[in-house]
Every structure is written in structure tokens, then in C-alpha cells.
Image (tube, rainbow, N blue to C red):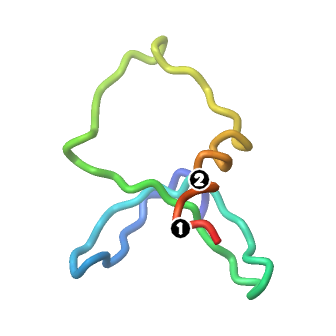
């Protein structure tokens, strides 16, 4: 798997789709962990490319620092 891949996971008894946005290695277990963003069909939008701005990967990871997914 790589960044940008769309994956599924059973979540709360249902299957949900996620986009992989990064990886890290858990320091205590050595396990490789994916950082994912949930894909919600209700929030999918079309946007002109010129309206988009890049985000540095380090800034993206900082956004997930308070998430329950990152340990």
C-alpha cells in the first residue's frame, strides 16, 4: 500500500472507505501504521484545480497529532 491508495475497513459493523495519507512506525511496538482520512460520499466535491493549495506533509501530520488514530 502507498499514500493515495483507497482502502476499506470494517468500522462500527459497517465497511468504510479511507484514503491513505501517510505512514509511521509505532515506536513501542515497531508496527507500521497507516494514517487515513475517511471518505464520506456526502462530502465529495468537485473543485477547480486553481482553487487548491498544497499542504506540506509535515503540516498534514501535525493536523493528525490530536487524532485518536495516531498513538
In the rendered image, residue 42, in percent from the top left (x then y), is placed at 19, 43
In which quadrant of the rendered view does residue 26 lie?
Answer: bottom right
Residue nearest the observer in this picture, 10 or 68: 68
In the rendered image, residue 34, in percent from the top left (x then y), is placed at 59, 67
Nearest to N terminus: mark 2 or mark 1: 2
Left-right relation of 58 to 67: right
Residue drawn at 53 percent across, 51 percent down: 4
In which quadrant of the rendered view does residue 2 lie?
Answer: bottom right
Residue nearest the observer in this picture, 1 or 64: 64
Where 63 sits versus 3, above or below? above
Q: Residues within 10 Å of mark 2 (few under 14, many from 20)?
A: some
In which quadrant of the rendered view does residue 16 lie?
Answer: bottom left
Query: Is disc 2 placed on a helix, strand or loop?
Result: helix
List the single residue furthest toward the top.
Answer: 50
Q: In which quadrant will I find the C terminus?
A: bottom right
The disc label shown at residue 47, or none:
none
In the rendered image, residue 17, in percent from the top left (x then y), is placed at 33, 62
Where 45 sits versus 7, above or below? above
Residue drawn at 63 percent across, 31 percent down: 55
Residue contact at pointers 2 and 1, CB within 8 angstroms: yes
In the rendered image, residue 70, in percent from the top left (x then y), is placed at 61, 66
Q: In which quadrant will I find the N terminus?
A: bottom right
List the single residue furthest toward the bottom.
Answer: 29
Residue for badge 2: 64
Residue drawn at 54 percent across, 59 percent down: 67
List the single residue furthest toward the front.
Answer: 66
Marks 2 and 1 sit apart, C-alpha to C-alpha, by 8 Å
Query: Is disc 1 placed on a helix, strand or loop?
Result: loop
The disc label shown at residue 69, or none:
1
Residue drawn at 70 percent across, 83 percent down: 31
Amino acid at each position: 500500500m502507498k499514500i493515495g491508495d483507497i482502502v476499506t475497513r470494517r468500522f462500527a459493523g459497517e465497511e468504510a472507505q479511507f484514503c491513505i495519507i501517510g505512514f509511521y512506525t509505532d515506536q513501542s511496538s515497531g508496527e507500521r501504521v497507516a494514517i487515513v482520512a475517511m471518505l464520506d460520499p456526502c462530502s465529495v466535491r468537485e473543485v477547480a484545480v486553481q482553487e487548491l493549495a498544497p499542504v506540506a506533509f509535515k503540516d498534514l501530520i501535525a493536523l493528525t497529532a490530536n487524532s485518536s488514530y495516531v498513538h
